[in-house]
Structure formats: structure tokens, C-alpha cells
Amino acid sequence: QDERDNDEDSEDEAERKRLPNALIIGAKKGGTRAILEILKIHPNVRACSSEVHFFDRDENYNQGLKWYRQQMPVSLPGQITIEKSPSYFVTPKVPERVYRMSKYVKLIVIVRDPTRRAVSDYTQSLERKPDNPPFEEIVIDEDGEINESWSKVIIGRYADHLSQWLKFFPLSQFHFVSGEELIERPAREIQLVEQFLNLRPHIKEENFYFNDSKGFPCFIGKISNSGSVSKTHCLRETKGRKHPAVKEEVLKRLHEYFRPLNKKFYEMAGRNFHWP
Ligand code: A3P
């Protein structure tokens, strides 16, 4: 029995807040919001609408598991509770803290070509700091090498982060989602997540349509935490931004930089993501 079970032994049948059974731990800009929103189509999934940042921020973690549980939506027995905070994947103290909550919790990681992920992350940062130097100037350091101290590069070193998590959790407790496939073939990709979460098959091709003006799939049949069903639903305009053009030679260098790390990650994760 882990701490979660001990904390929740009583009132098994009631609708109440429960600690998460599954966490979407990252990776930032991989498509974490999309996967959470798609999973909400399933009637047996309840999810926090905002990122809780319990395990990575001391001011939250120090409030304890009771506080964390309070942040969860209410659920019925048989429904699973999911939370996503993408910084969990890359924050060194998080795996042990999660393990202390539950050694059985399921862990979902959505990954995307780390070069494109870096550009996406940089694009997001431009909103807060429009005066940021161009991507090319930050990603290459004064010695002409890839700037390995830049968070946009560090986050894409997936094998490094996964190895920290594997010190606490077996590989069988992880599920890796392809960010690219979630856009190309969302139904197929989400069905793999349903299987991993032991959810009965529910989400189908009919739950998706490609929205030309957004340039991304949008969703049909989202169930809110209050139980109402919205007909169609796209992610906000902050998801699926236009990226600034980055010089081809710099992208090529980044791809070369990430290639051996990606290969290692494919081996660790047991899935080839076919990034360039
Ligand atoms: P871009 O904005 O760079 O295109 P996160 O939610 O982890 O921040 O990830 C954001 C990314 O989710 C977006 O990055 C986009 O590529 C991806 N994404 C996947 N499915 C999407 C969808 N249906 N609608 C919008 N963005 C989606």
C-alpha cells in the first residue's frame, strides 16, 4: 500500500477528490495540453484544468498531500484522476517526491523532435520577452558550439531526464506518446494511451476533425468536470503558434547534436520516434 491508498481508505463510493492515478510529466511543448484535453473526452477521466506544480515547487510541495488532493477535480470510483505539469519531467527532485506519493502512479511523457521542441519553446518565450535575441544567436555559444546551458536545449535531452525517473519507477509504468503522431493520427495515438491507463476503448476517429484555419486537429465531445459535453473544441491560440524562421544550417546542427541522445532515448523508451 502506498501513501495514496492509506490516505483514501474511507468513503470509497462517494464522489470526492482523489490524488492522481496518472501524471503527464512532460515534455514541455510536446503536446501536453492536447493529450490532456483529448483524454477528457473519455467519461472515466477527470483532469485538473490547470497545472498544479505540486512536486516541482517547494511552496506547493510543503503544503502536503492534503493540499494536493484539494487541487484535484471530484471523481467517482472507477474514474481516474490525471494531472499535468510539464516541468516534472526535467526537475531533479520530482521523481522521488512522486514515488513517495505512490510507487504505482502511471507516468505519461509526450515527446516531439527536440529541435522543433526547442524552437517551439523559444517561440513561447518571445511572448514574454519580445526583445529576445534571435534563436540562432542563443543556441550557438561564443565558441561556436551548441549552448548546452540553455533550457531550450536541456529540456530536449530526453534520455538524461528519463534516466533520473528510471531510478524510481520501472519502464512498465511509463507510456511515451509521439507528439508528431498525436497531430497526424490522434485517434490511434490516444487509443494507445487508453490501453496504458486500462480505460475501456471510447475515443474514436469521429472525435477528431482537422480544422483548416487552426492547422491542427480539434476535438468533438469533450466532457467537462461538471459532466456537460461540448460539441467542438480547439486548443487556444497559444497552442499551435507560428514559429519564426530559423536558419537551416542551425537546425541541421541541432539535429546532429540531438541525434545520439535521441537514439539512446529510443532504446530506453522502447519506441523509435523517427526524428530527423
Ligand atoms: P506549437 O505551438 O509549437 O505548435 P504543450 O501543450 O505541451 O505546450 O505543447 C504545445 C504543442 O502542442 C504545440 O506546439 C502543438 O504543436 C502541439 N499540439 C498537438 N496537438 C495539438 C492540437 N490539436 N492543437 C494545437 N496544438 C497541438
Image (cartoon, rainbow, N blue to C red):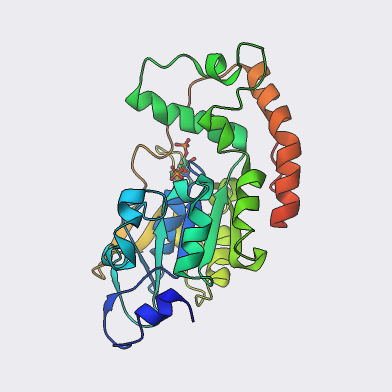
Q: Is residue 188 above or below residue 118?
A: below
Residue 209: in sight, yes or no?
no
Describe residue 152's horizontal placement relative to residue 237 as left or right.
Answer: right
Q: Is residue 146 above or below residue 177?
A: above
Describe residue 13's horizontal placement relative to residue 265 as left or right.
Answer: left
Residue 85: in sight, yes or no?
yes
Which residue appears at 71% of the width and 39% of the height? Answer: 261
Q: Nearer the viewer, residue 39 or 64?
A: 64
Q: Nearer the viewer, residue 183 or 192?
A: 192
Which residue ends up furthest to the front in the rendered image?
62
Residue 209 % position (x, y): 45, 52
Describe residue 110's horizontal placement relative to residue 276 as left or right.
Answer: left
Which residue appears at 52% of the width and 57% of the height? Answer: 95
Which residue appears at 43% of the width and 63% of the height? Answer: 39
Residue 52 % position (x, y): 34, 54
Q: Nearer the viewer, residue 63 or 106?
A: 63
Tally of numbered discs: 0
Residue 267 % position (x, y): 76, 52
Describe residue 224's horizontal placement relative to residue 190 as left or right.
Answer: left
Which residue appears at 53% of the width and 76% of the height? Answer: 198
Q: Nearer the viewer, residue 178 or 128?
A: 128
User: Residue 145's quadrant in the figure?
Assistant: top right
Q: Quadrant of the C terminus?
A: top right
Residue 14 % position (x, y): 27, 85
